[in-house]
Amino acid sequence: MHTKTMEGLIGARTNMNLVDTPMRVYKEARRKGDLGAMERAMGYANDFKGRAEEYKKVADEGMEKEAEEAKEKEKLEREEELEKKREEKREESREQISRLEHADTVELSEEGKAFVRENQDSGIDDVSLPATNPAVAKEPVLYTSAGTAKPAESKPTVSVSV
């Protein structure tokens, strides 16, 4: 709780309690018919009531400040949460990139690049047809673990059993 709010609430409550004493004196003076005592008692009561209203204003100001601080705090918490989510997304993308770095890569030769350019210009969508370009049609090769190509001795066969 904000200090102005506490000060205002305590001050207003105290002054409202203090109004009770002059009001009792006023009632007593009214029974006796003492106008001077009644006027003095009402003056004190009005003073205490006025102070209670001033303290009420202080309490209202404190509550407004408290509400503003709560809004700022909530805004900061939301910004921190957004930053955490952004950082998590960055971390996920870094992990994905690191996974991609360990993946196999393929480089197109100059002949392959030329083949793709020719097929893009001619409107052919299927680039996987080597028969359409004689420069690409070659004998099958096998790649060793060192990455060198050597001609395949026989045509590869695939057997599937279900």
Image: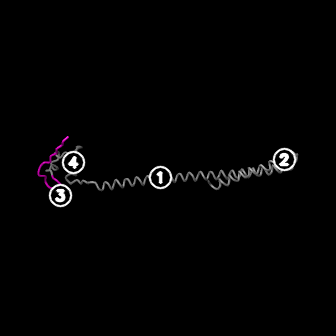
Q: What residue type is disc 1 on?
A: Glu
Q: What residue type is disc 3 on?
A: Thr
> Residue 118 got which mark?
4
Coordinates of residue 151 in the picture (x, y in percent): 13, 54
Q: What residue type is disc 2 on?
A: Glu
User: Circles 2 and 3: CB distance less than 8 Å?
Assistant: no
- Name the mark nearer the viewer: 1 or 4: 1
Give the left or right position of residue 146, taking residue 66 as reference. Answer: left
> Residue 119 got which mark?
none
- Name the mark nearer the viewer: 2 or 3: 2
Residue at x 51%, y 53% (from the top left corner): 77
Give the CA separation, mark 1 to mark 3.
Answer: 52 Å
**145 in magenta:** yes
Residue 87 or residue 107, whichever sits in front: 87
The region drawn magenta spans 141-162
User: Circles 4 and 3: CB distance less than 8 Å?
Assistant: no
Give the CA separation, mark 2 to mark 4.
Answer: 113 Å
Q: In the rendered image, which residue does mark 1 sit on?
A: 81
Q: In the rendered image, which residue does mark 2 sit on?
A: 28
Give the CA separation, mark 1 to mark 4.
Answer: 51 Å
Q: Earlier in the sequence, mark 2 or mark 4?
A: 2
User: Circles 2 and 4: CB distance less than 8 Å?
Assistant: no
- Name the mark nearer the viewer: 2 or 1: 2
Tag 4: Cα neighbours inside 10 Å, few (<14), some, or many (≥20)?
some
Coordinates of residue 115 in the picture (x, y in percent): 20, 49
Q: Residue farthest to the right?
A: 33
Element carrying mark 4:
helix
Q: Residue farthest to the front?
A: 162
Give the CA separation, mark 4 to mark 3.
Answer: 28 Å
